[in-house]
């Protein structure tokens, strides 16, 4: 297909199908009953949670990382155990993290905890969610946060989540969740 035809097809799609509707294909709203419920409960912007889920698992509730993080918000079994203790929940099992509601509840709670502990600094909270709060604290103590800021993967992660967050707000800002 030549460039002119491709351009005309893209122009047609943009003009006649509404650009936001096209973006919705790539930036979906899934599990909204849980995202909205726990975003409200823990006072976190639901669009940020959608951005985190998109970055972490692309909405795959059975996602499993090479580091053992599982589910929609990619929580490790040890972090899940820690969160269950903070929430005073008994009978925690690592397999609970594959349950979308529990995974989102834990992920939103944990992100809010990090956000609060790191002075409501979105970059630090995202860095801690990705690289671990211990690493971020170590970087802060060593005054290496800016120059070392982080693992290359964490820098890219922060940019990605913030980009997704802006896109989610742009697409869905005038819609009721």
Image (cartoon, helix red, strand yellow):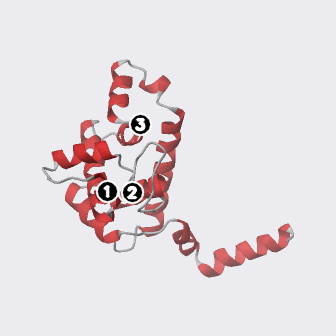
How many neighbours does mark 3 have within 10 angstroms: few (below 14), some (14-19), or many (20 or more)? some
Q: Quadrant of residue 68?
A: top left
Mark 3 sits on what residue? 131
Please give the residue where the numbered disc 1 appears in the rendered image: 95
Q: Nearer the viewer, residue 140 or 7?
A: 140
Query: Measuring 38% from the left and 74% from the top, which residue is drawn there?
Result: 175
Q: Where is 109 relative to 27, above or below?
A: above
Q: Secondary structure at mark 1?
A: helix
Q: Is residue 122 left or right of residue 163?
A: left
Counting residues from the N terminus, which is met first, the one under dot 2 or under dot 3? 2
Q: CA distance from mark 2 to mark 3?
A: 17 Å
Mark 3 or 1, nearer chain start: 1
Image location of residue 70, percent across then percent down: 39, 52
Residue name at image x 47 percent, y 53 percent: 55
How far is disc 2 from disc 1 in space, using C-alphas?
9 Å
Foreground pick, 155 / 9: 155
Query: In what element is the residue under mark 3?
Result: helix
Q: Position of residue 170 (x, y in %)?
A: 47, 63
- Of mark 2 and mark 1, the one earlier in the sequence is 2
Q: How many residues crowd around disc 2 within 10 Å: few (fewer than 14), some, or many (20 or more)?
A: many
Q: Nearer the viewer, mark 2 or mark 1?
A: 1
**Closer mark to the observer between disc 2 and disc 3:** 2
Is 5 situated above or below 123? below
Q: Which residue is mark 2?
A: 71
Q: Residues under labels 3 and 1: Cα distance?
A: 22 Å
């Amino acid at each position: 297909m030549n460039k002119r035809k491709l351009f005309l097809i893209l122009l047609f799609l943009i003009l006649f199908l509404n650009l936001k509707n096209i973006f919705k294909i790539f930036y979906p709203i899934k599990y909204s009953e849980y995202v909205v419920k726990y975003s409200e409960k823990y006072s976190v912007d639901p669009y940020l949670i959608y951005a985190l889920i998109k970055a972490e698992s692309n909405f795959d509730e059975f996602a499993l990382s090479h580091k053992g993080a599982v589910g929609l918000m990619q929580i490790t079994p040890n972090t899940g155990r820690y969160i269950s203790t903070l929430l005073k929940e008994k009978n925690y099992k690592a397999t609970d993290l594959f349950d979308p509601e529990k995974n989102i509840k834990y992920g939103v709670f944990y992100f809010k905890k990090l956000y609060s502990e790191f002075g409501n600094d979105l970059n630090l909270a995202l860095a801690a969610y990705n690289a671990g709060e211990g690493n971020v604290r170590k970087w802060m103590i060593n005054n290496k946060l800016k120059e070392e800021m982080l693992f290359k993967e964490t820098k890219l992660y922060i940019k990605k989540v913030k980009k997704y967050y802006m896109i989610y707000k742009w697409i869905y800002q005038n819609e009721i969740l």
